[in-house]
Structures are given as structure tokens and as C-alpha cells.
């Protein structure tokens, strides 16, 4: 019998943080007025990953319907912009805390899953730097390198070999490109990343993975908006019929102003009509993005 993994028992603090943040954001919107920054301004900044604004996104994703069980991923993704004269460098670090029941394909954070009976801990770490013109109007573009660091680590003192289930075991690198346009009330964009493994554990499979991420936002009033943010994944080392994961779906978002700062919240759900064997049928995610203005 396959042991079902439940990350809720392993990482309860993540859900507590999400609940506390949502409660606080609702209260803050009722008691604090935005000074100098309107909700609409913040919405468009939050929806453009190339905006030179400090933010800390927190995201919880559950991938369900796979043969071996569900995969839970909690991500901490600080965005740190750096001014370089007429250019900005937008840096994003992504720490991924993963709970997996064993081999589950078709997930960006686990490009080459390793056989096992289930484990939880820190997965691979992603770092991307995008160079973008400082003054780009309603159309923004950026390019730069993306890296994957094999930082997979168990949250327990059981044998180290089990930590292989949490990552690729490889240092990988490749290019990243992003395009964003914002003709009101829309935000439309495309983010493309391709990574190839360079070195690492010789017993692990090589990595050649592309993530194609089109995103669409339609803005309503009072900080509400509709969103579709689909991670299309291609693992090129797999057979043709096993390469692609293609989701369809979307969700709703709401931005709350906190004086000169803001919290952006999103709830989304997706179904995977195209997927490899042993992959999830669907996914759902909740995200909070804390935005800070100097």
C-alpha cells in the first residue's frame, strides 16, 4: 500500500502564516488608508514581475490526482530589484519546501523524480536575474540567467539518501526571458525558462526542462481581478508522449492596501488535460505577496 504524505502535519506554520496574513490584510484595509498610492497602482505593479518593487511572495500549491498521491509545495520567493542606471536587475530567489509521496512526474520543482516512499523537506533552490529597461511604459521585457541549486535537505535525521526525492541532484543553468504588457484593464505576459544540468550526482538523470508560463489578468474594481497563470512544463529527456504538462484554469485575486504598502492575494485552480504518466490531474494554489515601497 502506498503511504499517503500529508505536509499539513509536517509544516503547520505555513498555513498559520497564510491565515494570519489574510486576516490582518482585511483588517488593515478597513483601518488604514493608502497615502500617495492608489489600489490600482499597486495592482498593476503586483501583476508585473518586472516592476522594480521589493516584495515577498508566499505560495502554497497542492498537486492532486497522481497515482502515488499528492505533492505539497510551500514556496518563499523574495523579489529584490537593483537599479543599474537606465536598467534594473530583478532578482528572485525561490525556496521550495516539498512533501512528496514518491515518484510524481510533471512538476516544475521535481523535473527528474527519484523513487522512494515519501519524504518532506527543502527542495532545490531557484535563482533568476532579469535585466530590464528602467523606463519601459506599458510594455516591459527582461532577459537573464536562471539557476537551480541542489539544496534538497530532509526535515528529519533519517538516512540522507531519502533527500534525493526532494530535488534533481544537479546544478542546472539556462536562459530566462519575460514579456509583459499592461493595456488597462489587462495585464498580459509570458515567462520562459530553460535549464540544463551542468554537474551533480552522477547517479541521477540529466535535466533538460523548459517552463513556459503565459499569464493573463483582467482587473475589476476595488483591487479585485481575474487571473490565469499556467505553468506549461516540457521535460525534453522524456519520450515524446511523456514530455508535456499543460494546465488550463484560473482564479481570482484581491489586493489590500496597507498605507504605502500592500498585500496581494490569489486563489487558483488548474486541470491538466495533457500530462505524462504518474503525474497529477489537477493543482490548486493560494498565494500572498507582500509589496513594499521605499
Image: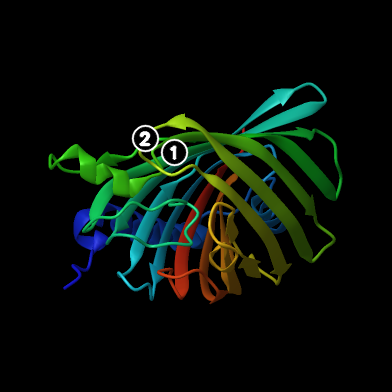
Residue 79 appears in which quarter of the rendering? top right
- The crowding category of the residue bearing disc 2, from other C-alpha atoms within 10 Å (few below 14, some 14 to 19, many at least 20), is many
Residue 55 placement (x, y as % from top left): 55, 42
For the residue labelled by badge 1, is the local secondary structure a helix, a strand or a loop?
A: strand
Q: Residue at x 46, y 65 (%)?
A: 285
Q: Is residue 24 left or right of residue 153?
A: right
Quadrant where the image shows the C terminus: top right
Q: Residue at x 38, y 34 (%)?
A: 202
Q: In the rendered view, would you say 107 is above or below 45?
A: below
Q: Residue at x 69, y 60 (%)?
A: 214
Q: Is residue 77 left or right of residue 96?
A: right
> In front here: 101 or 187?
101
* Measured Cα–Cα span from mark 2 to mark 1: 6 Å
Q: Is residue 102 left or right of residue 287?
A: left
- How many marks on residues? 2
Mark 2 or mark 1, which has the lower sequence index? 1
Residue 151: which numbered mark, if any? 2
Residue 279: which numbered mark, if any? none
For the residue labelled by badge 2, is the local secondary structure a helix, a strand or a loop?
A: loop
- The crowding category of the residue bearing disc 1, from other C-alpha atoms within 10 Å (few below 14, some 14 to 19, many at least 20), is many
Residue 71 appears in which quarter of the rendering? bottom left
Per the image, the residue denoted by label 1 is 125
The answer to whether any part of residue 259 appears in the image is no
Mark 2 touches mark 1? (CB < 8 Å)? yes
Quadrant where the image shows the N terminus: bottom left
Residue 134 placement (x, y as % from top left): 80, 33
Q: Is residue 22 left or right of residue 32?
A: left
Residue 157 placement (x, y as % from top left): 13, 39
Amino acid at each position: 500500500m502506498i503511504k499517503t504524505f500529508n505536509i499539513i502535519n509536517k509544516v503547520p506554520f505555513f498555513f498559520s502564516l497564510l491565515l494570519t496574513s489574510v486576516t490582518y490584510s482585511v483588517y488593515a484595509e478597513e483601518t488604514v488608508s493608502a497615502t500617495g498610492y492608489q489600489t490600482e497602482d499597486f495592482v498593476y505593479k503586483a501583476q508585473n514581475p518586472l516592476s522594480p518593487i521589493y516584495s515577498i511572495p508566499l505560495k502554497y500549491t497542492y498537486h492532486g490526482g497522481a497515482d502515488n498521491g499528492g505533492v505539497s509545495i510551500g514556496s518563499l520567493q523574495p523579489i529584490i530589484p537593483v537599479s543599474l542606471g537606465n536598467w534594473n536587475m530583478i532578482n528572485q530567489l525561490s525556496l521550495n519546501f516539498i512533501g512528496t509521496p514518491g515518484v510524481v512526474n510533471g512538476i516544475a520543482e521535481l523535473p527528474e523524480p527519484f523513487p522512494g516512499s515519501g519524504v518532506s523537506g527543502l527542495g532545490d533552490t531557484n535563482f533568476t536575474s532579469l535585466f530590464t529597461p528602467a523606463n519601459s511604459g506599458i510594455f516591459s521585457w527582461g532577459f537573464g540567467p536562471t539557476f537551480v541549486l541542489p539544496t534538497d535537505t530532509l526535515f528529519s535525521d533519517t538516512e540522507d539518501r531519502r533527500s534525493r526525492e526532494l530535488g534533481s541532484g544537479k546544478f542546472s543553468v539556462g536562459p530566462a526571458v519575460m514579456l509583459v504588457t499592461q493595456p488597462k484593464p489587462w495585464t498580459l505576459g509570458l515567462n520562459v525558462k530553460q535549464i540544463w544540468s551542468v554537474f551533480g550526482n552522477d547517479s541521477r538523470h540529466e535535466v533538460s526542462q523548459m517552463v513556459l508560463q503565459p499569464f493573463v489578468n483582467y482587473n475589476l474594481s476595488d483591487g479585485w481581478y481575474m487571473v490565469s497563470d499556467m505553468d506549461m512544463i516540457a521535460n525534453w529527456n522524456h519520450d515524446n508522449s511523456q514530455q508535456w504538462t499543460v494546465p488550463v484554469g484560473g482564479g481570482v485575486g484581491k489586493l489590500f492596501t496597507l498605507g504605502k504598502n500592500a498585500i496581494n492575494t490569489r486563489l487558483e485552480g488548474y486541470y491538466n488535460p495533457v500530462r505524462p504518466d504518474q503525474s497529477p490531474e489537477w493543482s490548486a494554489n493560494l498565494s500572498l505577496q507582500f509589496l513594499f515601497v521605499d
